[in-house]
Image (cartoon, helix red, strand yellow):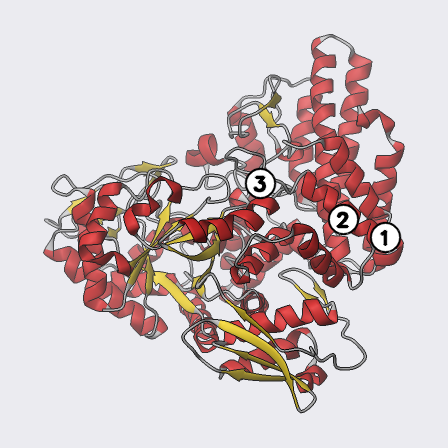
């Protein structure tokens, strides 16, 4: 496939075959990354330095000239009746050389079971965003299987060690082993085949793939299996045993690293020069004989032995990378490293030292665990990205590193648009263009509503945060719950109070609802209303939960029951609301898992469904319940009513001091319940609009819950 054919494929899939005749794509590499939009022989001519540059040019043309929106979740693709030529030629330069996508966690929290069709939809979106650097750990199970097989492990030992699909991210980061499996051997090979196809498409479009680097990981019992091996135990991570690590300075490390990289090339092919590895992610124990600088130097030098163009991609997260690790990297060649400043929007690590002169990427971290909340720092994205470029000598690009995705599309679209802007963006101007394309035409009332949203939920809160604001329905009920200004830690009783005016936010949402007569048929409008109304329902329910608690403590039983009933009515409304889309429903999440396991037999299908339910409830079992339970909560349609509602019913029903062990038992009853996964699909537009309308009426009529 050529880049030209790749762009034509995007047009064919998202606009339709006839529109391929509108466009002439021409790849023309140059010293700078750019795209240009002009006309030739009555067609729109899009030139670019690569396939993704041309795709970004296509996206710009469609939004600005055709008022068409091709998003990650929704599409508004009503093209004009005749071809629209751009008139004066347009040329735009990429001011962010790298446009990076994905956190390790994204692969487990969002896409562990995606098939070829769903992946192609995602790749099309990444290309339209101009993304040219993608972390891909799909199919890594096959690499590890072959690697451990070469080291003398048996099939049973290997499949017991490799975690299930929902947990691959944390095994690659050396956090865990032996959970969620054993998985059928053929599944590993099939996922690797899917990864090869995806990665070839990415390479053809000019995207570089970030693969796994080798930091010395081996099974925790490797020292027993291979007596005398220089193994350093890595302790635990959230109650789970971590894989062991080979002494980086040993001959065995060099041999295993060479083996690992050789096998990875055999599985996926060559041509990728980026390698991600975080040797001490969220803990870990250094070998006694080594300091961070020696480890950093050796790991990078070993990569370079395999690939002289290698670039080591390192996450800046918590205490990592240490200054010593950066010093070691510098000795091996800091131009061969790339630091991801994961949370530059609200906690910019780069400002401290610019990672000692190491190239780095300005990133946006969102959706911890896949937890939904309407929020985003639009003003930060529009202002800080160009300023960071001006004040940094080593910034190489921007990236989205959300732990999960499929949420808050406005901030992702704005983030990637800023790659092509030299100066801070005029948010009102940007919003008007974005909204006109997203809904198909401009509507003043919708614009005013979104301006208010930018002034409330989508503005900088002014402090570091994790974004889980007031998601009360998924909160484990406690008698000491209260509003507070700290993150809602899993064992905390504090509900995160919004940093914005809740009344003004609700006013904006109801104003946008008034445009329903014009926009109810638009998929993007329905998605926006779904998310915004979900947030309003949660905001109101927070107030009710606290009022119910106060009434209980004061012995006002009638008021307590009335508040509890009102709370549960809002929860039920939220469940109905989140059921209008496949990708916001429990059925959709479990259907992907069931379909992925079905080719390998009933046992595999049940295993995948069970793991999918485990991840979003207890996370990984009793060991993690105290630290990670509900970390990956989802306000899915079906899940709210089946899992979260019974917890609140039990709490409201006079069982106020419920021990953690009981919450765990309730969760495992849900996880272990065998069921046939429902067929998930998006609700018809008219039916979805009626659900939205009923909830708007509920909010307008229910004065009590506005207190």
Q: Find the residue positioned furthest to the top.
A: 554
Quick one: 237 or 63, which is closer to the camera? 63
Q: Give the distance between the C-alpha atoms of the residues marked 3 and 1, in whole angstroms.
A: 30 Å
Asked if residue 161 is positioned above or below residue 239 in the image, the reply reads below
At x 66% / y 46%, what residue is drawn?
636
Instruction: Tell me the quadrant of the picture where the C terminus can be found.
Output: top right
Q: Circle 1: is it few (<14), some (14-19), or many (20+) Cα within 10 Å?
A: some
Q: Give the distance between the C-alpha atoms of the residues marked 2 and 1, in whole angstroms.
A: 9 Å
Q: What residue did someone put label 2 on?
A: 529
Percent position (x, y) of residue 7?
Answer: 57, 78
Q: Earlier in the sequence, mark 2 or mark 1?
A: 1
Let me know if residue 692 appears in the view: yes
Q: Is residue 548 left or right of residue 102?
A: right
Quick one: 640 or 550, which is closer to the camera? 550
At x 69% / y 67%, what residue is drawn?
63
At x 58% / y 36%, what residue is drawn?
468
Q: What residue did someone put label 1 on?
A: 516
Q: Earlier in the sequence, mark 3 or mark 1?
A: 1
Quarter-of-image position of residue 305: bottom left
The answer to whether marks 2 and 1 mark residues whose Cβ atoms lie closer than 8 Å is yes
Q: Find the residue positioned furthest to the bottom.
A: 41
Asked if residue 132 is positioned above or below residue 285 in the image, the reply reads below
Let me know if residue 151 appears in the view: no
């Amino acid at each position: 496939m050529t880049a030209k054919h790749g762009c034509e494929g995007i047009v064919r899939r998202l606009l339709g075959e006839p529109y391929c005749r509108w466009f002439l794509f021409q790849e023309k590499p140059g010293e700078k990354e750019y795209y240009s939009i002009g006309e030739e022989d009555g067609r729109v001519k899009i030139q670019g330095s690569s396939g993704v540059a041309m795709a970004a040019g296509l996206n710009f043309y469609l939004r600005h000239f055709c008022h068409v929106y091709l998003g990650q979740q929704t599409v508004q693709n009503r093209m004009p009746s005749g071809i629209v030529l751009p008139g004066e030629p347009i040329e735009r330069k990429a001011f962010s050389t790298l446009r990076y996508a994905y956190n390790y966690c994204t692969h487990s929290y969002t896409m562990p079971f995606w098939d070829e069709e769903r992946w192609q939809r995602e790749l099309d979106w990444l290309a339209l965003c101009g993304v040219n650097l993608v972390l891909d750990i799909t199919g890594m199970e096959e690499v590890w299987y072959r690697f451990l097989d070469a080291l003398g492990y048996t099939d049973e030992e290997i499949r017991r060690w490799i975690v299930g699909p929902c947990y691959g991210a944390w095994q690659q980061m050396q956090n865990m082993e032996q959970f969620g499996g054993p998985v059928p051997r053929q599944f590993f090979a099939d996922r690797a085949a899917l990864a090869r196809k995806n990665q070839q498409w990415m390479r053809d479009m000019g995207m570089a793939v970030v693969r796994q680097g080798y930091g010395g990981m081996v099974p925790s019992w490797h020292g027993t299996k291979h007596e005398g091996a220089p193994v350093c135990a890595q302790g635990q991570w959230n109650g789970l045993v971590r894989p062991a690590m080979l002494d980086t300075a040993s001959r065995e490390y060099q041999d295993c690293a060479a083996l690992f990289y050789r096998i990875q090339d055999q599985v996926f092919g060559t041509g990728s020069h980026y390698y991600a590895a975080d040797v001490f992610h969220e803990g870990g124990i250094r070998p006694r004989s080594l300091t961070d600088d020696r480890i950093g130097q050796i790991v990078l030098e070993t990569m370079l032995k395999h690939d002289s163009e290698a670039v080591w991609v390192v996450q800046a997260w918590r205490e990592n990378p240490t200054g010593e690790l950066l010093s070691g990297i510098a000795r091996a060649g800091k131009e061969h490293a790339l630091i991801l400043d994961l949370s530059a929007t609200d906690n910019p690590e780069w400002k401290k030292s610019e990672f000692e002169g190491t190239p780095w990427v300005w990133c946006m971290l969102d959706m911890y665990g896949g937890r939904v909340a309407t929020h985003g720092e639009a003003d930060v994205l529009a202002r800080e990205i160009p300023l960071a470029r001006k004040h940094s000598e080593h910034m190489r690009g921007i990236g989205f590193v959300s732990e999960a995705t499929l949420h808050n599309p406005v901030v992702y679209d704005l983030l990637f648009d800023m790659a092509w802007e030299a100066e801070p963006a005029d948010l009102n101007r940007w919003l008007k263009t974005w909204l006109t394309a997203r809904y198909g035409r401009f509507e003043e009332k919708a614009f005013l509503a979104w301006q208010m949203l930018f002034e409330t939920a989508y503005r900088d809160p002014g402090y570091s945060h994790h974004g889980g604001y007031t998601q009360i329905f998924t909160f484990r009920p406690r008698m000491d719950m209260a509003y507070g200004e700290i993150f809602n830690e899993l064992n905390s009783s504090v509900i995160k109070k919004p940093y914005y005016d809740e009344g003004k936010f609700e006013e904006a949402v109801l104003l946008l609802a008034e445009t329903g007569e014009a926009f109810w048929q638009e998929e993007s409008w329905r998605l926006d209303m779904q998310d915004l109304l979900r947030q309003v329902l949660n905001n109101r329910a927070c107030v009710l939960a606290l009022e119910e608690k106060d009434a209980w403590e004061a012995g006002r039983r009638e008021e307590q029951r009335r508040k509890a009933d009102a709370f549960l009515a809002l929860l039920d409304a939220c469940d109905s609301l989140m059921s209008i889309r496949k990708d916001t429903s429990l059925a959709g999440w479990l259907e992907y898992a069931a379909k992925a396991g079905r080719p390998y037999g009933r046992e595999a299908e049940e295993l995948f469904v069970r793991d999918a339910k485990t991840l979003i409830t207890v996370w990984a079992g009793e060991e993690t319940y105290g630290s990670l339970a509900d970390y990956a909560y989802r306000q899915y349609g079906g899940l709210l009513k089946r899992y979260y509602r019974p917890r609140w019913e039990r709490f409201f029903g006079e069982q106020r001091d419920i021990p953690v062990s009981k919450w765990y038992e309730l969760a495992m009853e849900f996880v272990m319940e065998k069921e046939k996964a429902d067929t998930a699909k998006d609700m018809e537009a008219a039916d979805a609009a009626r659900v939205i309308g009923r909830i708007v009426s509920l909010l307008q009529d229910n004065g009590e819950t506005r207190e």
